[in-house]
Image (tube, rainbow, N blue to C red):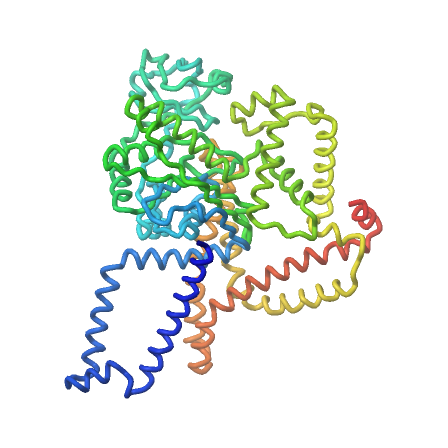
Amino acid sequence: MEEESNFSKHINRVRSQGALLIACVMLSVDSLNPIKIVCSTIGIPTNFVAYLSLILLLYLFGSHFTELAYFGVRVFFTSILSIFFAKNDCIGKSNIPRHGPIIFTGNHANQFVDALQVMTNCGHKVGFLIALKSFQRPVVGFFARIMGCIPVARPQDTAIKMPDSETIRVNGNIIYGNNTSFTSQLKIKDKIRLRGNPEQLVVKKIVSDTELVIEQVCGDELKEMNDSKWDLLHYVNQSNVYDGVYEALRMGQCFGIFPEGGSHDRPDLLPLKVGVAVIAFGLIEKHNIAVPIVPIGLNYYNGHRFRGRAVVEFGPPIRISPELYELYKKDKREAYKELMLIIENSMRSCIVTAPDYSVLELVSMARRLYIPSHKIPTPELKQDMNRRFAEGYKMLLRQYSLEANDRINSDDEHLGFSNKDLPEDARILKEHLEDYIRKLNELGLKDYQVPTLAYPNPLRATYIVLHLFVAWSLAAFPSLILNAPVGIVARKMAESERKRALAGSVVKITGKDVMMTKKIIISIVMVPSLWILYAFIICFFTNWGNSLKVWIILSMPLFSYAGIMATEAGMVDIKDLKPILMRLRPEKKREMLKL
């Protein structure tokens, strides 16, 4: 079947190329030009056909404007992501159904970049549910409307911080207040969030000013937060949002949903919102359409930095079984819970989760050391091995540390345990890995450089120096004039955005998940503005010839991109040159030889 598909693709490509070449021949020779032959036969001017074709072309663009605009946006952001990320790997694309409607559901680790990764990799026209406050932003809202996104008013966006004098404590599904006025402050279906914890507790019954009943039974983690400050999240009726999504899916459109609710930088999933299950079951109930749910894993490595790496993994589609739909008819809440558990497990199978970032670093280093240095693993193998090492690490925690096991079950992001809890061979391995990582960080080296430390190569050092000189000679002018102003402003504004987002969030660790989005937005605005400014200066303040002016202005995008690539190549050369220079210091040389 695959051989037949490749043969068909080959024939179609040859046929298209042949048709194009035949058309070029016919249009180049007047006696073979079909337009001129027909016009001369019936006695009408060829301009008439040109004007008619132009009118039809405008009609074609107008009638398909939405699709063409979406296609243009996708091409634009594909180029943007290829510039901002050194590598974008896509895994499991064969798991995506060829025809819609489809619901894509993924983790939310890099704000608006997540949606761009899905849009540019899934191969379908896909819209998204987007926060209303983001939809109202100038640049983001412009592109969101073209993509067919539906705005959602989220309760957390209008959360009210209650006075510090009012505190609450949780006991099972009962909340007791201190100095509170629940009867006047709250309504049924409103939500309460203990400050410093992301979980939202839905009000089921208000007993008195100091006592209420919530829908879910809380775990030990919330019970331990005695006399906690709290935030009030008023209930938002989302029926119009659901109706819009139902209609879009009924018409065959694909939709992307990030069920964690908001972007974050934690190394594990946040509790998932039930909305995706409501949509999936509701579509069957209202329109008898069983839409597949495709889980997505969005994995970033230095995703907040320019020229980081991203891995997008699509998992096997989830389909609602007849048995699960029968359960939905009897008990909606239980059916939602079961489907969300399936979705969560499927999403976890597409990402690498860990208790904290130090464990992720440990897992990544173990994978790099496990694979022989002469072998280049595929993105699929890298992702699979990272996941296996991470899951194996968590299995050790469950088996050898009851305390760690309790923290795993409570999804504590600060999970950790002493090395002495591990069996001796695992403990020694972990200590060696941690020591190896620490020494690399102290020396400022990368793991791939270690095999070259014992055998210096003068010819390679000479090549690196010459390559660095050539790369930076080419990059100096375009980088300083075209790229440096944008980079400096984008970095400063991204850092300000990170601090602002961190101050307003209870789930973010450092707030780095918003930085890349800010850098992209700043670049989208500043880069063309800078080109226009330079074009204005060239046109009105230089005595150059017109052809030279046009050539320089049209070459600005090429110079800018060439500057980025040359600068990146130069930075790699500097990293490779660093161990060569460090060998000149005896104490550093001894440390490097120990590695």
- Placement of the N terminus among the 4 image quadrants: bottom left
Q: Is residue 525 above or below residue 469?
A: above
Residue 190 location, quadrant: top left
Report the residue at 50% width, 48% height from top.
Answer: 91
Q: Position of residue 346 (x, y in %)?
A: 46, 35
Instruction: Identify which residue, 564 or 58, lies in the foreground.
Output: 58
Residue farthest toward the right in the current orientation of the protein: 586
* Residue 77 visible in the snapshot: yes
Q: Position of residue 187 (x, y in %)?
A: 29, 21
Residue 579 location, quadrant: bottom right
Report the residue at 49% width, 35% height from top.
Answer: 348
Report the residue at 46% width, 78% height from top.
Answer: 542
Instruction: Identify which residue, 81 or 587, lies in the foreground.
Output: 81
Q: Position of residue 357 (x, y in %)?
A: 59, 37
* Residue 136 visible in the snapshot: no
- In the image, 4: left or right of 311? left
Q: Is residue 567 above or below residue 250?
A: below
- In the image, 50: left or right of 136? left
Number of on-image labels: 0
Q: Position of residue 594 (x, y in %)?
A: 81, 45
- In the image, 193: left or right of 69? right
Report the residue at 41% width, 50% height from top.
Answer: 122
- In the image, 408: left or right of 191? right
Q: Is residue 93 above or below residue 580?
A: above
Residue 397 location, quadrant: top right
- Placement of the C terminus among the 4 image quadrants: top right
